[in-house]
Amino acid sequence: MKITITLSSYLAKLYTFNLIFLLFGLLSVTYLFDTVELIRRASKHDDIPISIVLQMGLLKLPEVGQTLFPFAVLFSAMYTFWQLTRRYELIVVRASGFSVWQFLLPMAVISVLFGALQMTVINPIGAVFISKFEDMEHVYLKRQKNQIAVFDEGLWLRQPVLIDTSPEEIPEENEEDVQQNTSPEEENTNVHSPNLVEGYVIVHAQKVVQPEWVLKNVTVFYFKHNNEFLQRVDAKSATLGKENWFLKEVTIHKSGAPKQFDPRYVLPTTLTVNDIQESFSSPESMSFWKLPDYIRTLEQTGFDATRLKIYYQNLLSQPLMFCAMILLAAAVSMRPPRTKGTFIMIASGVFVGFIVFFLSSFLQAMGSSQQIPVLLAAWSPALISFLLGLSVMMNLEDG
């Protein structure tokens, strides 16, 4: 017997309502806890109004919400099946000759569509929100002035610096010698003259060599704090040391002055390797549609894009994961109302949901460390969940 449009519409509407209701409930609780945590962090500073904290909590909500989506799909499906069983509607449908696959189909379709919506619409919108949240977090909570970005043209970073308007030549030494044989006071004496002005520099590198963290074909633009351009410095390479960039084969271009050539040049910095790595756009702040181009740009620049690849493939697997949640929910919830142990089976379903979550996090961590392939790390949780739910339902339905 084919399932009717009326029955399919009823099941789809019931499940969609439960999904939206539960999702809003989870998001409300999440927003409450996130806001409390942000208030705690903001309490360390006296100049952050409560309106900024509430706004940051809203901006962070889409990121956490996307993590909760599989749980919302699972729990709402379990609740839907519990409703159908309690009101004996499920028994009537089965007695009418419908198989389990026929009345699971509408909810499975809704979950797949929701996964596609999350991947193509919700994720790009959430990426805009979380990007704004990260900018506000750097300004209000972390008080960071360094800005780093990667584009097709290479790596760009901006950092505040005290600019020496009459730079002196640095002796030809290895970076190791400078770090080991020069005290901080001597370094400052060598790097700076008394004629200092506050400003910032914009550093551009066409390529980055890892794990040595050597920038290739470097250009440094010096600006005063009022955006007045001072000079440009070109270098063949730059190495990040302790509190300094060490530039090699440097050419200095000054306005109204001839070119000056320095074999060595030191640019003070507060950046570390971890700062640069963490400052790249997090996967959550990248739109699904922009991820492929950004991954290609990172690889061309010389950075490891494994984490972004796993995130992108994980987004592609979301429709399958949500469909698997429907099967797992049905496997633990579709029981006659008088069958004993229903609560234990539902609790088992909740436990399975958390196991899937931790399995997904564990495999993604292994993939990010390149211990397993990207596709295996991203698709394994969805495939395992889907095959597990499918096998249990086939055993229950067909024996």
Image (tube, rainbow, N blue to C red):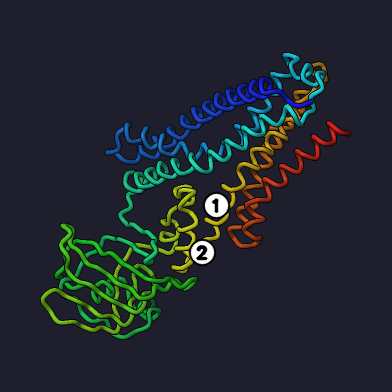
Q: Residues within 10 Å of mark 1 (few under 14, many from 20)?
A: many
The numbered dot on residue 312 is 1
**Residue at 57%, 35% in the rendered image:** 114
Image position, residue 195 (x, y; %)? 14, 70
Residue 144 appears left or right of 65: left
Element assignment for label 2: loop
Identify residue type, mark 2: Asp
Image position, residue 291 (x, y; %)? 48, 54
Q: Contact, CB < 8 Å: mark 1 with mark 2?
A: no
**Residue with the most extreme top position:** 87
The numbered dot on residue 165 is none
Identify residue type, mark 1: Tyr
**Residue at 75%, 43% in the rendered image:** 387
Sequence-wise, the earlier of marks 1 and 2 is 2
Q: Quadrant of the C terminus?
A: top right
Q: What residue would you read off at disc 2?
A: 304
**Residue at 69%, 18% in the rendered image:** 83
Q: Quadrant of the N terminus?
A: top right
Instruction: Check the image and report above or below for 307 versus 382.
Output: below
Task: Identify the image quadrant of residue 149.
Answer: bottom left
Image position, residue 322 (x, y; %)? 64, 38
Element assignment for label 1: helix
Residue 344 appears left or right of 106: right
| Number of marks present in the image shown | 2
